[in-house]
Amino acid sequence: MDPRESLQISGLQDGDSIAAVAQQPKIAATGRAFALWCGGGHRIVTWGHPDYGGDSSRVQDQLRNVQQVRATRSAFAAILADGSVVTWGDPDFGGDSSRVQHQLTNVQQICGTQHAFAAILADGSVVTWGHPEHGGDSSTVRHQLRNVQQISSTVAAFAAVLADGTVVTWGSPVNGGDSSRVQYQLMNVQQICGTLVAFAAILADGSVVTWGRPGWGGNSSRVQFQLRNVQQICGTLGAFAAVLADGNVVTWGNPDYGGDSSAVQDQLRNVQQICGTHRAFASILADGTVVTWGDPDYAGDSSRVQDLLRHVQQICATDSAFATILNDGTAVTWENPSYGGDSSTVQDQLKNVQEICGTADAFAAILADGSIVTWGNQAHGGDSSTIEDQLIYI
């Protein structure tokens, strides 16, 4: 049914029955644009900088039965129900997949570096496109990419976990694309996380293996004895934070990027979730409070809003600001106002928030009724006023 037409025009008559399924919209972001869709929907609404994926008009007629959307820094890739892929945005960042379009069939998952995409097909093989030196060319390891289960990325490299728990890497060697130094340790890998230039892999026994630039998270030797029973890992641009089974946290990497949590270590107990800006971390504790550390200018200091951070459920980040959702559906933000850290102009609208997503410097919140509230850099997604009339299609 066309939402612009009356029931009479639609052909419905008195006594007809209508079945409806309510779906919560989903959202994805590049560095300067947002994409909003509903699973199985026939339309995506985009806004923000046109060159960063904010203009999807060129491919809008191809976007049917959208299942999943992923992003690089400046392009989007959508997986459709038939397993095909539609891309848009900057061609140099993966927005043009024409070179490999005939290979993009039965796609199950997509992951992106800043400049390239990697797609896992149903048979476990991988197709890549975008900047060749940033992971867009996987030809040197193509014969190894079999039975791939998941893919993670840094700024310019990919790491694929195979069904047997081994790992295959490609892309920029200095950014994690070369794992030869630790390849013998990469067995029974369960999960991989990346900073800007390094990877950290959690093994089945809860230990961790790292590689990439040593001072930026690629060398965890200083804390290796503490990395036991690791449950999850999160990264900033230059540091990692690992949550252990007992709720404690271990950090390593560049101290200026959150790699040193000693100032708050006694507060990091019963940690449930961690999120990172470019240079700071924020953790949610079991009691719903928040502990932050790292560069204060990148939201590593939450003292200004600490009294408001109660019963926190989720945390999201831009490059240098955090936004949290409380259990009453309201939101609290802090740090750099130019990057979404000040939501005062829309605070009265932030009710019944279900999800928040961030570009580099703007936030978008999805409310329970499916409406959108945005703030931050207006040119990079912080102003959604131009697409409000399109939301009826979502």
Image: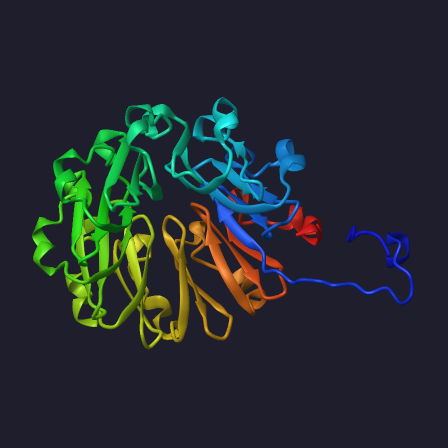
Task: Give above or below for 359 relative to 368.
Answer: above
Q: Is residue 310 left or right of residue 21?
A: left
Residue 100 or residue 255, whichever sits in front: 100
Q: Position of residue 176 (x, y in %)?
A: 23, 36
Number of numbered labels in the structure image: 0
Q: Position of residue 119 (x, y in %)?
A: 43, 37
Residue 113 or residue 290, whichever sits in front: 113
Q: Position of residue 163 (x, y in %)?
A: 30, 45
Q: Residue furthest bottom?
A: 287
Q: Is residue 383 left or right of residue 165?
A: right
Q: Is residue 11 left or right of residue 1?
A: right
Task: Give above or below for 75 relative to 384.
Answer: above
Q: Is residue 235 left or right of residue 184?
A: right
Task: Give above or below for 237 relative to 101.
Answer: below
Residue located 52% across and 27% down the image: 101
Residue located 79% across and 50% down the image: 2
Q: Position of residue 24 (x, y in %)?
A: 58, 60
Residue located 31% across and 53% down the image: 297
Residue 278 or residue 167, whichever sits in front: 167
The quadrant where residue 152 appears: top left
The quadrant where residue 134 appears: top left
